[in-house]
Image (spheres, grey):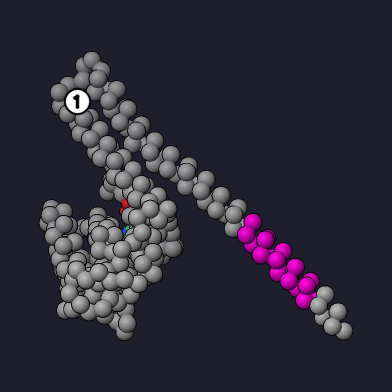
Amino acid sequence: NNQVQLNLDRNDELGELANAITRLSTDLDRLKRERNEFLSSISHELRTPLTYIKGYADIAGRAGASEDEKREYISIIREETAHLTELIRQLFELAQLDHNQFPIQKKAVSVNALFESVAALVRPAFEDKNITLKVHCQPDVTAFIDRERFQQVLLNILDNARKYSDKGSHVTLLGRLEKDTVLMIVSDEGNGIPEEELPMVFDRLYRVDKSRSRQYGGSGLGLAIAKEIVESHGGRIAIQSDYGKGTTVRIVLERGEPVAEGFVGGR
Ligand code: ADP
């Protein structure tokens, strides 16, 4: 009887092993497919601005182009170059995050102070578009985060809120404690995102409206970077949207010890 039981157990184990191998191989196929799709999207994203740059450089150099035309072409070349530079910077940032090249350095950070410094950075761009940015944080909220990385997260999200909102609208950045976590919320009254596209917006290079996004200068990497950073902190990020009415991004994070900023927390 014991012998039969042993053989049965062994069969179960072998079966489980075979299942695990099948799952691994499916995962590997999926990863390969995703990598190929990502690479072909990247080449497309890099080629498009280069095509514009080459085309406008060619016609600007042609005999007969007026000074006004040349100025216009050069300005397009500048914009496309800036777009390309930003795209490459973001790709590089993602590659660094993927390879964990600069491990996150968590410290207890005052969320109020973080919000203030981020708001100071984005304010000129918001004012340019006449969008009001309201910032509010409960006093003494401390998050256990890498401050620089998180600055990037908030910059990416606020930049979207500004880009995809009309002149005259409002954007709010809120911070508060909820139970044992820190909550950061960015909401806008902008274009919104169709419900069926919401699950994809954190994917690399995904943009909701390709032609419109081009005009806004987006690359489709901002939210992917934000998600990567939030999750590497053990936090969660979620997006909610009412198409045509506005969008809300919520981040939930581990709470830091309520001490003065600058305290170097260890794990
Ligand atoms: P991008 O650089 O194109 O803004 P993101 O990864 O930051 O890339 O965002 C992905 C896409 O999600 C954007 O192209 C845009 O279509 C949509 N999106 C993100 N945030 C917002 C928002 N606040 N309002 C409306 N659409 C948004």
In the picture shown, does residue 99 fall above or below 245? Answer: above
In the rendered image, which quarter is residue 256 located in?
Answer: bottom left
Is most of the magenta stretch helix, strand or loop? helix
Q: Nearer the viewer, residue 172 or 235?
A: 235
In the picture shown, does residue 33 fall above or below 104? Answer: above
204 drawn magenta: no
User: Would residue 186 be seen by someone viewing this image from the given angle?
Assistant: yes
Instruction: Characterize the local packing of mark 1: few (<14), some (14-19) or many (20 or more) Cα atoms within 10 angstroms.
Output: some
Q: Which residue is mark 1?
A: 70
x and y, in percent, of residue 160 in the image? 27, 57
Q: Secondary structure at mark 1?
A: helix
Left or right, 171 with reference to 36: left
User: Furthest-top residue in view?
Assistant: 63
Q: At 59% from the left edge and 58% from the top edge, which residue is drawn?
A: 27
x and y, in percent, of residue 93 in the image? 34, 50
Q: At 79% from the left edge and 71% from the top edge, which residue is drawn?
A: 11
Report ligand 1 position as a quadrant.
Answer: bottom left
In the picture shown, does residue 134 fall above or below 125? Answer: below
In the rendered image, which quarter is residue 12 located in?
Answer: bottom right
Looking at the rendering, the stretch of residues picked out in magenta corresponds to 8-25
17 drawn magenta: yes
Ligand 1 within 8 Å, label 1 CB: no
Q: At 39% from the left edge and 65% from the top edge, which residue is drawn?
A: 231
User: Would residue 208 be seen by someone viewing this image from the given angle?
Assistant: no
Q: Nearer the viewer, residue 104 or 84?
A: 104
Q: Amino acid at mark 1?
A: Lys
User: Looking at the rendering, in which quadrant would you find the C terminus?
Assistant: bottom left
x and y, in percent, of residue 32 in the image? 56, 49
In the rendered image, which quarter is residue 85 located in?
Answer: top left
User: Looking at the rendering, in which quadrant would you find the N terminus?
Assistant: bottom right
Q: Nearer the viewer, residue 159 or 118?
A: 118
Q: At 29% from the left edge and 60% from the top edge, which residue is drawn?
A: 149
